[in-house]
Image (spheres, rainbow, N blue to C red):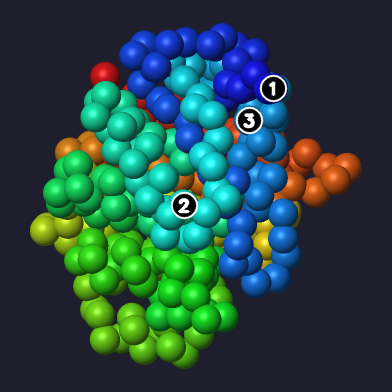
Amino acid sequence: MTENVFFLESEGGRPAPEDSLFHILPVPYEKTVSYGTGTVNGPAAIIAASQQLEAFDGISLPVEQGIYTHPAVDCSGTDKQVLGYIEKKTASIFSLGKIPVILGGEHTVSYGPIMAAKKHFDVIGIVHFDAHADLRNEFEESRYSHACVMRRVHEKGIPLVQIGIRSFSMEEQKYRDENSDIICYNASYIYRENSFTIEFPEDFPDDIYISVDVDGLDPSVIPHTGTPVPGGLFWYDFFKFIESIPAGKRIIGFDVVELAPADGSAVSDFATAQLTYNLMGIISRRIK
């Protein structure tokens, strides 16, 4: 059996789980993608690219907080079985008082850790970066399609902020219209108004889980994803939104999904690994 490679092992070695603030959980799940394929290879590509990152993220050394990498989740079962595996594994990370970092795989995988977070913290909010709203009730005969994941989350009564959206169906627009509690920062609004700050309502939960579909960023930043929709967020603009989360709110975990690595090019793999590491840096600095 091939030994499990750790995220940024080249700089941080192989710390014990109890000594690591961040717990990487690779989830190579791909069953409902509807255009480009390859997300099944995303987690391994991100971890491989992380070996080329610098430990210093420009401000701090997040690797000093410890980064433990779990073996990849077995994704051979049905959608509900796999989501159950992810939820159970994420719950065990929360029980240690650690921060789960889920690497997908298609966006469907986000449902598992979000359900684990809701059960552990009770009241949570989601900040969701994506080119798509993912609010369909069903897509291609599946209620657990990648195009439905945020519909399933919102139906559980979890407040939702969506950022960078620029491709959605009339069904999804209708659902948004009927559920005004969903806070929307469509890409067209962001760049028309030059606005990169999340304005949270007073009753938005203090415990926040972040879900990042890499197609939320512009294809000039991360081109290798299933649906590279033009007009997305640029690198520093993405982090402006993250940094705008008030200090009084706690980022309890996050996922990075929908990378579809391309043969002969590591540009998207490296950018996604850097994005993942930079998010760790922001979280580690906030909790000091």
In which quadrant of the rendered view does residue 160 lie?
bottom left
Q: Left of 104 or right of it: where is 267?
A: right
- Residue kind at label 1, given as amino acid type: Thr
- Residue kind at label 3, given as amino acid type: Ile
Q: Is residue 56 above or below residue 70?
A: above
- Residue kind at label 2, given as amino acid type: Val
For disc 3, the neighbor class at 10 Å (few under 14, some 14 to 19, many from 20) is many
- Whether tag 2 and tag 3 are in contact, CB under 8 A, the answer is no
Q: Which mark is residue 47?
A: 3
Q: Which residue is mark 1?
A: 2
- Upstream in sequence: badge 1 or badge 3: 1
Q: Residue at x 23, y 66 (%)?
A: 156
Does any portion of residue 64 appear in the rendered image? no
Q: Is residue 173 above or below residue 83?
A: below
Q: Which mark is residue 150?
A: none
Q: Residue at x 69, y 37 (%)?
A: 45
Q: Which residue is mark 2?
A: 82
